Amino acid sequence: MSLKPIEELRPHYERWGLIKDLIDQCIDLMLNYRQSGHPGGSRSKVYAIVSTLLSGVMRWDIREPGKRFGDRFVLVAGHTNPVVYATLAAHV
């Protein structure tokens, strides 16, 4: 699989910024609702998760998560679970 040139991705950066803001807000809502959690770990990984999932680096389809030969994104840090749930909520 070939990577897209940066010039092709540039027009999407503004939209990616909106998605990043939406994910940040979802993290805040989750942690404020529960009155618990550490937002720093999750919020520091929002840029990485947005750029990884939307740049075309990974072969994945949210509509078919068990698709054969699809890439998997594994985040091991337990305190960063809110970024995973917020990203899923923003992409659905």
Image: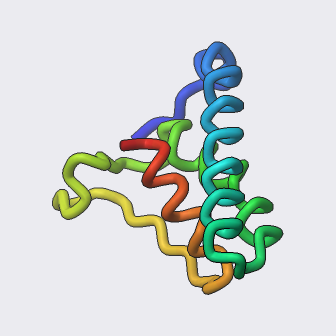
Q: Give how far across and how far down residue 60 sits, in percent.
A: 34, 50
Q: Give how far across and how far down residue 77 sits, in percent.
A: 64, 83
Q: Give how far across and how far down residue 14 sits, in percent.
A: 70, 21
Q: Give how far across and how far down residue 67 sits, in percent.
A: 18, 57
Number of numbered tags placed on the structure image: 0
Residue at image coords 54%, 56%:
86
Residue at image coords 72%, 49%:
47
Rendered view: 18 above or below 52: above
The one of 1 and 12 positioned closer to us in this rendering:
12
Rendered view: 67 above or below 55: below
Residue at image coords 69%, 54%:
46
Q: Is residue 29 left or right of residue 62?
A: right
Quarter of the picture containing the C terminus is: top left
User: How are the colours assigned in the image?
Assistant: rainbow
Quarter of the picture containing the N terminus is: top left
Figure quadrant of residue 40: bottom right
The one of 35 and 7 positioned closer to us in this rendering:
35
Q: Is residue 82 left or right of residue 57?
A: right
